[in-house]
Amino acid sequence: MRIDAHQHYWMINRGDYGWITTELPELYRDYMPVDLEPLLNQHELDGSIIVQAAPTIEETNFILSIADQTSSVLGVVGWLDLFAADHREHYARFQRNPKFKGFRIMIQDMPDATRILEPAFVEALQGYAAEGVPVDLLLTSQQMEPVLELLRQVPNLHGVIDHLAKPPIHKNELGPWSHYLKEMSAFPGIYCKLSGMVTEADPEGWKKEDFVPYIRRVLEQFGPQRVMFGSDWPVCLLAAEYDEVMDILLHALPDSWSEHELERLFGTNAKEFYRL
């Protein structure tokens, strides 16, 4: 099974995508399965994981409704507010849908990332970790220190770092991103998505070589067993087409990789992580 482990669908008139504005004309339109499925077919992908694009319960309801009607949607990563007293009630309701596979913590949007270390938040995440619930972690390279501390307090988390934790590819800098990523990779339940890279590079002047050091560093630290391909479509369209995103990753892979390792990167790991 070949899987795109990270993509989004949205309908602008739903009104809760505060970050998608007319200043982003490439994104300021509806994106639905009819737009993505030809690309999945072109790259012989069996389906995808939809990840929430708005921090609302309504967003999770919306993408679950798409999943119910779309065979190419293999799983849904929704949203929960772990600071809210009723997050467990929402989780129980979402879980009744067989395509609901976990939720994402949007640390990137927090003005103060250390809030994730508040006792109530840590306790809530410890509860989900004890149940083995898949959790996506959206963060930037500037937020890696508190996230690393969170992992120390929830060492059994079944989690995946989205978009390599957004390293400063446009600056061609590896540290301290690489240091923190290595520390995070020491937790056996933590995976990393090779996704969202083109929007961290120079959007108009990137070259495939720009991404090689970052991709290779992730592969070195997480190995072929804990990495996943994700297109981050349609957000990637700000800097690259779907074909180019795929080419960037294929270009950076070691020549020594076997067919088995490629299968893990492009599907098996996502299937196991999200328990598809």
Image (cartoon, rainbow, N blue to C red):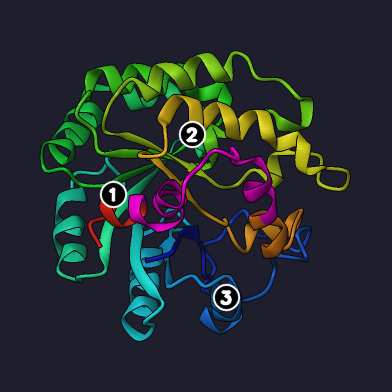
What is the secondary structure assignment of the residue under circle 3? helix
Disc number for residue 96: none
Mark 2 residue crowding within 10 angstroms, few (<14) / some (14–19) / many (20+): few
Q: Give amino acid for label 3.
A: Leu
Q: Residue at x 37, y 66 (%)?
A: 1
Q: Residue at x 60, y 40 (%)?
A: 255
Q: Position of residue 41 (x, y in %)?
A: 55, 78
Q: Residue at x 69, y 48 (%)?
A: 248
Relative to 172, does residue 82 appear above or below in the rendering? Answer: below
Q: For residue 112, say whether it is visible.
A: no
First along the sequence among labels 3 and 2: 3
Pointer 2: what residue?
Answer: 110
Evaluate if marks 3 and 1 touch, with contact meaning CB atoms under 8 Å apart: no
Which is the main secondary structure of the residues drawn in magenta?
Answer: helix
Pointer 1: what residue?
Answer: 273
268 part of magenta stretch: yes
Q: Is residue 228 left or right of residue 128?
A: right
Q: Give amino acid for label 1.
A: Phe
Pointer 3: what residue?
Answer: 36
Mark 1 residue crowding within 10 angstroms, few (<14) / some (14–19) / many (20+): many
